[in-house]
Structures are given as C-alpha cells and as structure tokens.
Amino acid sequence: MTTASQDTPAPTRDLPLTGTAVPPRTPGRTRLGVMGGTFDPIHHGHLVAASEVAGEFDLDEVVFVPTGRPWQKAAGAVSPAEHRYLMTVIATASNPRFTVSRVDIERDGPTFTVDTLRDLKRQRPDADLFFITGADVMGEILTWKGAEELWQLAHFVGVTRPGHDLAAPVGSSGVNLLEVPAMAISSTDCRTRVAEHKPVWYLVPDGVVQYINKYGLYLGPGDAMTTDHVGARGVSAKAP
C-alpha cells in the first residue's frame, strides 16, 4: 500500500465494514476508486477516507472528481470550480495513488453522478469503478438521476463516522459501508472557521491552507484579506 503523505493523517486499521461482499479482483483489470465531491475545501477526512477504501478494496488508484455545477446547490453557493480543482490537486499531489480529473468541471450543465461514471467508464474501459461517497447521502441515491443505472456502473462504498448507524438504501446492490474516524471533519465547518477567523490548520492539508489564504476564500464581505487570515491564530483584519 502506498505510504500516505505527511499532509495526510496515518490511516487507521481494522475499520468496521458492512454490506455486500467485497468484489473479487478481475485479472487484467484496474480497480479504480472514484471520489466525487464539491471539495469546498478538500480536507483530511476526504483523504483518509480515500486511503482507507483503497486499502480495504485493494484499489490501484483513486481519482478525485470535483463537481462542476452541483445539481442540488444553487448557483453561486459553491466556490468557483477552478479553485476547488486546484485545491484538490494540491491536497493529493504527494500520494502517487491519487489523481484528479476535470471530467465534471469541463462538462456543461449540472453535475450528476451517473454522467461522471459514464464518462469515466468511457475513458477507462479497462477499469472496475468503486464510487466513494459519504454514507449520509446513501439514502438519497435512489432519487438521483439514472439511479437504476448506477449499480451497473460502479460498486458503491459509503464512508461514515463511528457511531453513525446507517444502512444501504433499499433496492440497492453492490454497496458497502465503512467507518472512517476522520469523516467527523466537514467542509462546511472548515468554511465556517475561516469566515469566523479561526484556524483550519490540521483540518485541511497545509498547501490548501495556504491556497485559501492566498485567494481569500470563504471570507465575509466585510473582511479584508491579510497575509495570514487562516493562520495559527485565525485572525483577519476588518475593512474600515
């Protein structure tokens, strides 16, 4: 297994895994994890989850796919796609098992998971796909566009925090749930901390902290960017 980067907390071991049997490896085919998400910003919970699923399911690669226009969020509710893409590149750069795809941000219109998986299937016909998502959205999958096709396109892995009791959606097949302690971190909390001038060190990779700082992401309209608005003290200046 690839050694995690210094920016990625060490993965845990012997995590609870529930659901259907882990699919056996098919000789001659790549096992490709697909980590979709807004990544606004990407944080250590995403990275640890991807690393744990890669180890548990013997994945050869995990491709992170930042959403272009999330269909369930209003326009303007997320940071520009290019910022989210670049933060994801920075966060994953030091792990040779991780890659980042622009497939969703370069597709016109709202982003739907079924389109993501169809495009990756076309790009990687030699790969078996394992879609990694938060287990809290597993119950909504049957309402997604093309839900009946999703189970044919990929095996689904829902990652959840310990003590969060969830089951695979009724009517689904090819689903596992995996507990990952670091999933207690959320992008929403990270954005809120930045807006409240609190530090996000050790919640997101160091390079992402610096990127947020450089471009003044997640600040309120009354805030002026300083050289360290997400720094150790989490202090930022107020515009006069």
Image: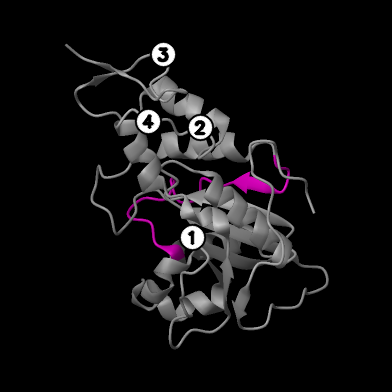
What's the magenta bit mostly, secondary-structure-wise?
loop
Q: Of the two numbered discs 3 and 4 on the same chain, state the one appearing first in sequence.
A: 4
The residue under the point 62% across, 83% down is 20
Q: 103 or 113, which is in the foreground? A: 113
**Is residue 222 found inside the magenta-colored segment of the image?**
no
Residue with the most extreme right position: 27
Q: CA distance from mark 2 to mark 1?
A: 31 Å
Q: Of the two numbered discs 4 and 1 on the same chain, state the one appearing first in sequence.
A: 1
Q: Mark 3 — residue?
A: 227
Q: Are marks 2 and 1 in contact (CB under 8 Å)?
A: no
Q: Mark 2 — residue?
A: 201
Q: Is residue 134 left or right of residue 55?
A: left
The residue under the point 55% across, 53% down is 182
Q: CA distance from mark 3 to mark 1?
A: 37 Å
Residue 66, x across and y down, in percent: 47, 48
Q: Mark 4 — residue?
A: 198
Identify the amino acid type marked 1. Thr
Q: CA distance from mark 2 to mark 4?
A: 9 Å
Q: Is residue 112 above or below residue 2?
A: below
Q: Are marks 3 and 1 in contact (CB under 8 Å)?
A: no
Indicate the secondary structure of the residue bearing disc 2: loop
Q: Which mark is residue 233?
A: none
Q: Of the two numbered discs 3 and 1 on the same chain, state the one appearing first in sequence.
A: 1
Which of the two discs, 2 and 1, sits closer to the camera? 2
Q: Which residues are magenta?
A: 95-113
